[in-house]
Every structure is written in C-alpha cells, then in structure tokens.
Image (cartoon, helix red, strand yellow):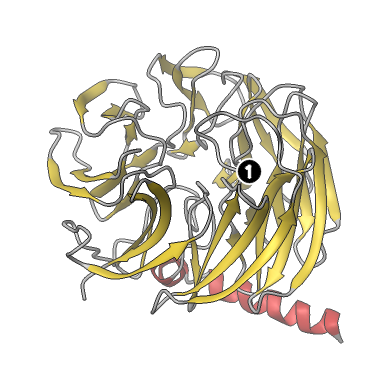
Amino acid sequence: MKFIISTIYSVILLILSNNVGTAQEKNWSQWRGLNYDGIASSEQNPPISFNKKNNIIWSSKIEGRGHGSPTVHGNKVFLATADESIKTQSLICINRKTGERVWTQKVHEGGFPEKSNKKASQASSTPATDGRLVFVNFLNNGAVYTTAYDFEGKKIWRQKISSYILHQGFSTSPAIYKSLLIVSADNKGGGAICGLNKNNGEIVWKINRPKKPNYTSPVIYNLNGRDELIFQGCDLVTSLDPLTGKKLWETSGSTTECVSSIVTDGEHVFTSGGYPRNHVSAIKADGSGEVAWENISRVYVPSMIVYKDYIYAVMDNGNAMCWNSKTGKNMWRERLNRTTSASPVMVKDRIYAIDETGNFSVFSANPEQFKILAKNKIGDQAFATPVICDSKIFVRVAEIIEGKRQEFLYCIGEK
C-alpha cells in the first residue's frame, strides 16, 4: 500500500512539474531554484528598495550560525543551522506567512570538525524538498550524511555519502531529479557523487571522485537533447546521466577547487573557480572538450547568471561583470559591493546581490550599460544566497547586537 501511495504521489509531482512557471513563482525548492540557475520567474515583482524599517514583512531569529540558503515550499521555510556552543546541527521549519517557528529537529549532536576556514560554517548546505520530504546535508564525525524529514519534522532516513577529510569546509547542497536525490562530497580523501532513492535513502548509483578538495553543488540541465548532471572541480568538468550515474563526457577545463555551480546557455557550460588559479571558461556542451573562451576573473564563490546570451557575475571582490556568452567579450566591469560570498539572484531584468557586510544592491541586467537600481542595507554580515519567490525576498543575515552575533531570516516584500 505504501508503495502504491508513493507511486501515485510521484505521478502527481511529475504532472505538477510541467507547470514550471507556477512552481517557480510560488516556491524555491533547492539550491539556485527550480532550474538551478538563480533566476526567479518573471511574473514576480519583489521590491527594489528596502531596509529594516521598510518593506519587511517579518523577521525570525535563528539560533547558531549557517551559510545555507532558505528553501521555500508551500507554507513552510526550511533552514539549516549549527550551534557551536552546544555542538548541534539542526533543521529548522518556519511558517512562511508569519515567520513563527514551526519545529526544530536536531540532526546531529557533537562530531564537529576541529578546524575549518574562518569563513566557513557547520551548516552551509541548502536543503532541498520535493514537497513531501525535505533533505539536508551535514559534515559530521568525519563523514558527509544526508538526512530526510517529512514536513511535520519526523526523520524518515539517513544515509552516509562518503568519509570526508576536511580542507576548507563543507557546503554542497542536494539536488532533486525525478525519483532520486543527487548528493556530492568531494574531498582530499576521495569523495563521491551519489544518486539516492529519495523515499528511503538507498544508494542507487555511486561514482568515486579524485582525492582533491572541492565544494560545488550538483546541477542538472537539459543539454544535447537529454538531461545531464553537470559538475565542476577536481580539475575536471564532468557530465553524468543523473538517473544512472553513467559518465556522458568529461574534460579538463576546471580548477581544482570550485565553490560556484556551473551555468549554461545551452551551447556552452560556464565554469568558474579560484584555486590554484582564477578562471572563468566557456566549454562547448557537446562533450568535445573544446574551450570557446577563457579569462582569469575571480568568480570563485558566487555562482553566475546567464540571461539572453550574456553572463552576469558578482566577483568575490564585489565587482559586477558582464560578458558575451558566445565570445567572452567583456561588456563592462564596475564596482558594486564589497567582498561577496552569496550568489546573485535575478527576477525580470533585475539582479539582486548581497555582500558579506549586508550591502544588498540591485542592478540592471543590461549588457550595454551598468546601472544600479537601488542600494540597500540588511544586517551586518551575510554569506547566504537570497531566494526570491511569490514576489518576496528571503534572506539570511547576522546582526551584531551589544557585541553579540545574532542571525535572522528576513522576509522582504510589499506589505
């Protein structure tokens, strides 16, 4: 009976997924959104100007620290956090309309790694949801684990993905593909990319990876008339069949360590990395390995956006960039914000970008001219990528209150 119910539910989800615009407008179900590209549906119209006293619908206090983005679905918002003082890693559920806490589930207790990059957190993964279960990754006790909860906060399953030798930290987020959950855990001990049965956590396929550190999250695009899981890092650009794990093609063209996720215009896949060298490259998406163009810009942490044959990026130093996606021609480069870790997000022809000090700028996606539409300020620290759905912006920031750091999740929109 449970199998029949699960099958019926999967069919319903498949039917609903055909209405991509509606789903994308109302929900933000995984890292970088429904299409993995950081672009919200154009039917939305979130505010351009806002601050703590203007266009704030609600704010919710978040214990601990985390750099993962919120995941929004239905009437719930999910967020991962870690409390260093009591060594817990938790999944939080918040009421989408009011900002009130619905439940908190302790996923792990203890097992924190001893050393990490000073910018890293113990909760840098963004949860993913299929509307029935919510999935979250954590590095704990020397291994990466994925755990699934239902919407009422009941744990359904947990799966170990790979042992993990810490280098800078852990940040990769899960991706949903049909009946599977795709999870990655590159590290110096030799990690893995896995396809899990999202209903019970069983490993359907597993690909071993090079013994190199890397932090990028898996994304799935339709290329060459088929769905391809595109992954960068460990000095490789890799394409896998997301349903089976079969290698479709692989080429050099990436740096060793990447944080950003690949983007595409359908003809190229665009990689960016920052160690051991800075680079942005356009690689033909046909599996030939041909590099169409390359430059040495540092877009190491924030992921890029592709829109109408142009690439828009916010570099780690806060500069905004625009390139022609076909030729690599630099259209403009201008100062936007300060040091930036969060990826930009886009709606209509507007790009929203927040830097590490809470400067939240909006600029125009116009290749002919750089134009700032608004300069806003939310919080004192910001590392998590904002999300946009239902004409609202959900953003995780920290404020320094009487010398103490306190995180908040803000819901920004027209009241």
Where 403 falls versus 169 (above or below)? below
Where 323 falls versus 411 (above or below)? above
Q: Quadrant of the C terminus?
A: bottom left
The spot of residue 147 in percent (x, y) is 74, 59
Tell me which corner region of the image, top left, top right, bottom left or bottom right, holds residue 278: top left
Instruction: Using the rendered image of the protein, determine whether residue 177 is visible from the camera's viewpoint.
Output: no
The spot of residue 261 in percent (x, y) is 52, 37
Q: Quadrant of the N terminus?
A: bottom right
What residue is shown at x 22% (from left), y 49% (from top)? 377
Tell me which corner region of the image, top left, top right, bottom left or bottom right, holds residue 46: bottom left
Tell me which corner region of the image, top left, top right, bottom left or bottom right, holds residue 249: top right
What residue is shown at x 41% (from left), y 26% (from top)? 299
Residue hosting label 1 = 228
Q: Is residue 77 left or right of residue 4?
A: left
Where 55 falls versus 278 (above or below)? below
What residue is shown at x 58% (from left), y 40% (from top)? 224
SS of the residue at dot 1? strand
The spot of residue 378 in percent (x, y) is 27, 52
Front residue of 112/209: it is 112
Instruction: Using the rendered image of the protein, determine whether residue 319 is visible from the camera's viewpoint.
Output: yes
Q: Is residue 136 left or right of residue 124?
A: right
What residue is shown at x 60% (from left), y 59% (from top)? 128
Furthest residue to the bottom?
1
Front residue of 261/343: it is 343
The spot of residue 138 in percent (x, y) is 68, 48
Q: Amino acid at mark 1?
A: Glu
Question: Label 1 neighbourhood size at 10 Å, few (<14), some (14-19), many (20+)?
Answer: many
Furthest residue to the front?
402
